[in-house]
Structures are given as C-alpha cells and as structure tokens.
Amino acid sequence: MPKTAFTNAQPSDAATPSQATEENPPRKLTMAERGIRVAKPRKELRPRRFKYNAEEHIAFFLETEPGDIVFGEIPYGPKFVEDFKASLLEPVAVLPDDSEDVRQLKRSVQEMKEELKAKMDAGEDIAKIMRDARRQLIELGNYRTSLEDELKRIARGGEFNEEEFGKFVGAANKMLEAKGLSPIQPTRMMYKMLELKARRINRK
C-alpha cells in the first residue's frame, strides 16, 4: 500500500487560494507550471479514469510525492462526502484498455476507499482527513521550495565556492530527510552561477 499524506495527516493553519474544487479535482502540475521551460505539447485531453470525483481526489494523493508543489486547499465538504459514499456502492472499475500503471493506481484507490470507509464507520470525519492531508502536502511542498530558493540565492550571491556550496546542499538535504522528503539535486544553472561569480572574482 503506498504511503500517502492522509495516512498520518496533521492539521495546520496554512491556507492559500485555489481554483480547485470538489467538482474540479486537483491534478499533478505540469513542467511548465513548475517554471520549467518545455516544448509546447499538442492539446490532448486525458481520458477520465474514475467514475466518481471522490476517487479522482484520492488518486491525486496517491500520485503526489510529498514535497511536490500543491496549490491551495479544497474544502472537501458535504458534496465530497456524498460522492464518496456513492463510490462505495461499487468497486473502482478497471477497463480493458487501462495501462498497468492505471490498473495499479485503481487498485490502490480501492484499498484507500476501504480504509477511509473504516475510519468513517468508526466516527471519523473523512472530509477533515482529506483537508488535513492536502494541507500537509502544501506545507511539505512549501518547505522544500523554500530550501531550493535559499540554495538558488546562495548560488546567485557568489560568496561561496563549489565545495562550500555543496555543504549547504548537504545541510538542506539532511533537513529534507528528517521530514521524509527526497533530496535536492542542484541544477546545472546553480553551478553555472557559482562558476561565473568565481571568474569575476579571479579577474579582479
């Protein structure tokens, strides 16, 4: 069973605006939305993978790595709970043309539906569980982004050489490891900025 944000979600006070709603499920950010320049893809619509929006919301958590950028909170109110209850009346449908990755995702969504149903039957508020899980993902994404931004600032400043910069990267990755997040891989641009600054210093 994949480890997800709502396995051990903790509440917080973080809040940011979002266009995502219960009727318009969240999705993974594209490379372009992350600020990475990519060739413009052909306009294609991804086929709907799930019958219920609640299942799509659950899939989002399963597909999102802690530390990924997640924009804004979703209320997960009565409409979500109603849709989730309706989804319990039938298992997630696996279609003949589903890829193996999609089949695995659907199996995981079904397992998570059963876990959430057990929590709901025990009196827990599944809407709150979903809200807290998304809030936790937002916080982890912001935490990772803040460390990446700090490394970029250090690289731009040119006050440290490559070896010293590597120590900052190591320290940042230890902080990420403590939260169970994957390490930062410095970009070529960061090292390029360090190199250019070093050249300027050597010319003086």
Image (tube, helix red, strand yellow):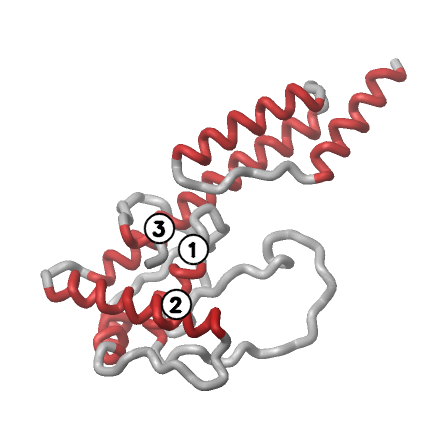
Residue 103 rendering spot, x and y as whole percentages: 42, 74
Residue 141 in the figure: left or right of residue 44: left
User: Which residue is farthest left?
Assistant: 122
Q: Residues within 10 Å of mark 3 (few under 14, many from 20)?
A: many
Label 1 packing within 10 angstroms: few (<14), some (14-19), many (20+) = some
Image x and y of residue 131, in percent: 30, 56
| Rendered image quadrant of residue 31 | bottom right
Q: Which residue is mark 2?
A: 21
Label 2 element class: loop
Could you give the CA–CA distance between mark 2 and mark 1, rounded to whole angstroms? 10 Å
Q: Residue at x 52, y 41 (%)?
A: 145
Give the foreground label among 2 and 3: 3
Of the numbered discs 2 and 1, the one sitting upstream in the chain is: 2
Q: Residue at x 71, y 59 (%)?
A: 38
Q: Quadrant of the N terminus?
A: bottom left
Residue 147 placed where, x, y %? 53, 34
- Relative image position of residue 48 (x, y in whole percent): 46, 80
What amino acid type is highlighted by mark number 3? Arg
- Seen from the viewer's position, the closer of residues 153 and 46 is 46
Residue tagged 1: 72
Residue positioned 27% across, 76% down in the render: 83
Q: Amino acid at mark 2?
A: Thr
- Give the residue at mark 3: 135
